[in-house]
Amino acid sequence: MKSLGRFSIFVFMFLLAFTSAQFVQGAPKPIVIGFIPGENPDVLKEHGQGIASLIQAKIGVPVTIFVSKDYNDMIVAMKEKRVDFAFFTAMTYVFGEKEAGAKVLLKKVWEGPYYFATILAKTATKLPQLKGKTFAFVDQKSTSGYLYPQVYFKKNNVDAKSFFKQTVFSGNHTESIKMLREGKADAVAVFSNDAKAKDTAWERFPSEDGKKYPHPKVLWVSDAIPNDPFVVRQDFYDKNPKLAHDLMFGMMELIEDPKEGPNFQKLLNVKSLMLATSAQYEPVREMVKELGLKPESTNSK
């Protein structure tokens, strides 16, 4: 009987140890969501942690964040499986899809699912009228403020360096509009929220001095540019399809939640999220090919 008792205790301890090991092995592994720098790093990290906390509470799985050094660094992190999900820019996704197996799930919605590039001019109504004038871009990595206009110029056989008297980079859309208002630039390339350029950076960034300025002429509006996507690593999706869908639809539910929605929108700086497909980013692929861009050239709006 004593030996049977010892055997029972041994079996009990073995089962307890086995069950504990199984519990540890079955514990959910933290998923990692990546964020590309587009604002103050400290602010981005704070916002990212807030987003992770809301998602973790929603789906019941630990969530951590990764803030990349730059756009290419995020692609490398996903390729090396240090990131499972990530908020990409449209062009980062095009490169990430090819180099790191990024699969698009959702895209951000600001005013709509797409935005546009537009050229606004002080007086000119046609491109030839800008010859010998001063043109302001946002910066060399801006999609609407530089890259899409470059495709337009290329198709119209315009070499910006020789066509314009001067080209300058303002640094942001607000400054470009300010330069146009003050006559420091004859034309600018900025974003538009609609295809007819009725809601552009001009309307979004009103005059700081309170003066009324004549509305600029609209010379050109690009094809639709898809908004920034939320992606998952393809191999992670293949192994964890349910988890990927729980997170994806959980985020969509969060942003519509009466209680958590406003905070989630604020942290993401969007109005909503919507389902997205790879095909929607074909115009970006064409632009990348046309300009011969490399991964390090990517940027956002």
Image: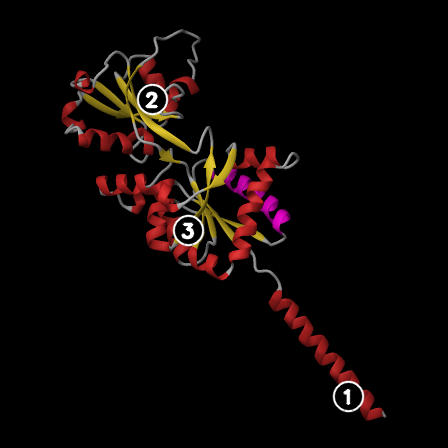
- In the picture of the structure, the residue carrying the numbered disc 3 is 103
Amino acid, disc 2: Ser
126 lies left or right of 257: left
Q: In this view, does 163 lie above or below 291?
A: above
Whether residue 134 is situated above or below residue 115 in the rendered picture: above
Q: Quadrant of residue 213?
A: top left
**Is 216 inside the magenta-drawn segment?**
no
In terms of image quadrants, where is residue 170? top left
Residue 196 figure quarter: top left
Identity of the residue drawn at 65% across and 68% down: 23
Q: In this view, does 206 lie above or below 224?
A: above
Residue marked by disc 2: 176
> Which circle, 3 or 2, is nearer the viewer?
3
- Residue at the disc numbered 1: 7
Q: Where is residue 208 in the image (x, y as percent from the top left)?
A: 43, 13
Relative to residue 212, is residue 187 drawn left or right?
left
In terms of secondary structure, where does tag 3 sit? strand
**What's the distance in space between the residues labelled 3 and 2, CA to CA?**
34 Å
Tag 2 secondary structure: helix
Q: Residue sitting at 72 percent across and 75 percent down?
A: 16
N-terminal of the two: label 3 or label 1? 1
Give the residues in magenta: 41-59
Prevailing secondary structure class for the magenta stretch in the rendered image: helix
Q: Earlier in the sequence, mark 3 or mark 2?
A: 3
Q: Can residue 31 be seen in this view?
A: no
Q: Name the residue at the right extreme.
A: 1
Mark 2 / mark 1, whichever is N-terminal: 1
Q: Which amino acid does label 1 sit on?
A: Phe
Disc 1 residue crowd, few under 14, some 14–19, many 20+, Cα 10 Å: few
Label 3 sits on what residue type?
Answer: Lys
Q: Tell me if residue 57 is in the magenta stretch.
A: yes
Numbered marks: total: 3
